Amino acid sequence: MNLIEKMMQSSGDCVFLLSGGPKSHLARSSMLATAFSHRLVIRQPNIKPSINHSPLNGETRINHQKVPFVAELQSFQNEWHTQKLISADSLKSLFCALKPFTQIGQRWSGILSYEMLQWTQPIKLHHPPLEGTILGILWLVESWDKTSEPLSFEVGPPELTGVEYSTTSDEEHINAIEKIQNAIRAGEMYQVNYGRRWNGRLVEHPKQIFARLAKSNPAPFSAYFEARDLGIAIASSSPEILLESDGKNVMTAPIKGTIGRGKSLEHERKLTQELIKNQKERAEHRMLVDLERNDLGRVCTPGTIFRSRFDVEAYANVQHLVSQISGELHPDFTGIDALNAMFPGGSITGCPKTVVCASINELEGAPRSFWTGSAGWIDVHSGASTWNILIRTLEAHHNKKGWLGQIYAGGGITIESKPSAEVEEAKLKAAALLEACGWQEKSDKKPISKPLEINTISLNKAPITINQTGRIHYSLQKSNDVIFVDNLDSFSYNIIHMIVSEGKDVTVIQGRNGSNEDLASIFKANHIVIGPGPGRPEVSAITMSIARECLHRNTNVLGICLGHQAIGLADGMRLIRSPSGPVHGIPVEIVHTGGSILPKEDIIKMTRYNSLLLDGVPKTLEINAQQLSGNEIMGITNGSNLHGIQFHPESIGSVHGDKIIKKFLDLERIVEK
């Protein structure tokens, strides 16, 4: 009896991790477990909605004080009984609490809903789940049935029910996209992933639908979970991994960028090259790579994070751009910390992550539940783990009337998105699931279906090993090499790692929570970096205070993007919307007149992530850098210790960005007279 037959015949709880790809360098085997002695059920606590503000309009409220959630540790004796209640305020504290109940070598496997972000992001939600809602289920797996061989599914066509309905109309979908694009123009965010939901009655058991889905839409990180007594089943054919860790290293492989497959080998190669050269697709992918580098930076040793692969992965019907980003976990952290830092995945939120997570909940008007959450396994002792991202997923609930299902689909919205096209793309993404459930007739348009292929793209430069690193602090020290003002950007840790890789200690302070009372201590530092972030500089009181004060100080100060804009505003310039429109994730050519931190090359290529620009003539500073096309202001300086740059030197698409950071850190402090 193979794993498929065992899964179909199981009558109780079921955990099935299916590498249905076929096999790739990431997904190598399939695992099934059906007999359990313990499981953990995570439930939503009573959390009041966060209302009377709009994150979409720049009114994100930061909340670091977390209401603990409660998880029921249950044991099985003919039926499930609650053995212990575990209170936790993070994924890390939850998994650490499971160590006494877990023997060495045992793993917990299960599902985490998207709304677990309430304990990984510093926000409260407009529309939190109802109290008692199941947010996650984890089973203690004492033994697996495993195979590395391909599995075949014999399943017939579904009964056509035609009972599904979308909770979002096409008009509402378009209106939501337009709201997102207005927010992007205003500088509040770079990209937002918006989803819509389909609900309906299921006339088959979800296992049958999973088998059909695995046959028609195979993927390397497919999964099926069922908790019989709770009436919950999750069937997913996901192609995307969130993270993989062996306890010492961690890897993520974000997917962003899509094109169809070719009718012939020649046509296929042509489409592949179109995808690789498409500016929009590459910009979105670059943004995601920069975001995931940042998230890994929270837990990895500086200087160890690099893009180890860049591939075009071809699935049955489409081709995707996929990067593999790897890093060595800092000795203080494990794979548990990595999951806490990276959840939810940036490819299904957008950027900057914290702001867009709040905006998504405001826009969608309801919890996502398990869609865009994660499924996988973890060893709570070592931190070794593998987690996917739950896309292409059916969530099913059983009641007296039978099984009810819900399906989500959506996509990343940028300033270049065409609303009507995005609506159709969401419907196409949902089509395989709708057809597998019998909610929609199989399309007459037969997509090209071919085996999985991986085409590796050569990287521009090899990984660089950094031997000299400083330390990261989170409170002001008596002596500070560098103070970094974190303005809630999803690239901050990329900059922080560049600093500590130069052997400097860096103290991170929160721009939106900072106090002006700290100004005296801040200006004792040798260097201050005012980081980028969403919105206008005025949302960060400490950023504007530093910007005004640094005009009259000899402290070395570098403002990046929002920090640069703050310095310009403090010196009498105006902040306007970019005349050429928002530019996000695109390297541009910049001409400069020199300066103490810019490279010797007259023209440099740097990545922009901004919708707003400085305009006008500064009172005391000078403009020393402009974009080659359009003459938009890219740099200001006083010629010695004070510098502002509109571009992002830390981006993977910026050339010589590391030199700019190094030259700034090499500036000696001018002694106050």
Image (cartoon, helix red, strand yellow):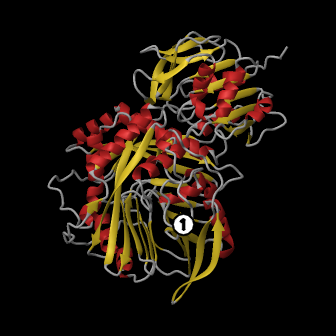
Q: In the image shown, does 642 or 578 lie closer to the viewer?
A: 578
Q: Could you tell me how many numbered marks the image carries?
A: 1
Q: Is residue 480 left or right of residue 164?
A: right
Q: Secondary structure at mark 1?
A: loop
Q: In the image shown, does 643 or 339 lie closer to the viewer?
A: 643
Number of residues whose C-alpha sits closer than 10 Å to that of mark 1, classed few (under 14), some (14–19) or many (20 or more): many
With respect to residue 610, does 100 lie above or below? below
Q: In the image shown, does 322 or 138 lie closer to the viewer?
A: 138
Residue 668 figure quarter: top right
- Confirm whether residue 668 shows in the render: yes
Q: Amino acid at mark 1?
A: Gln
With respect to residue 197, does 583 lie above or below? above
Q: Which residue is mark 1?
A: 44
Q: Residue at x 56, y 56 (%)?
A: 118
- Confirm whether residue 292 shows in the render: no
Residue at the far left: name it: 444
Q: Which percent across, then down, holds residue 371?
A: 42, 59
Q: In the image shown, does 241 or 542 lie closer to the viewer?
A: 542
Residue 311 figure quarter: top left
Q: Which percent across, then down, holds residue 434?
A: 26, 62
With respect to residue 624, does 119 lie above or below? below
Quarter occupied by the C terminus: top right
Q: Which percent across, then down, holds residue 642?
A: 68, 18
Q: Residue at x 37, y 37 (%)?
A: 281
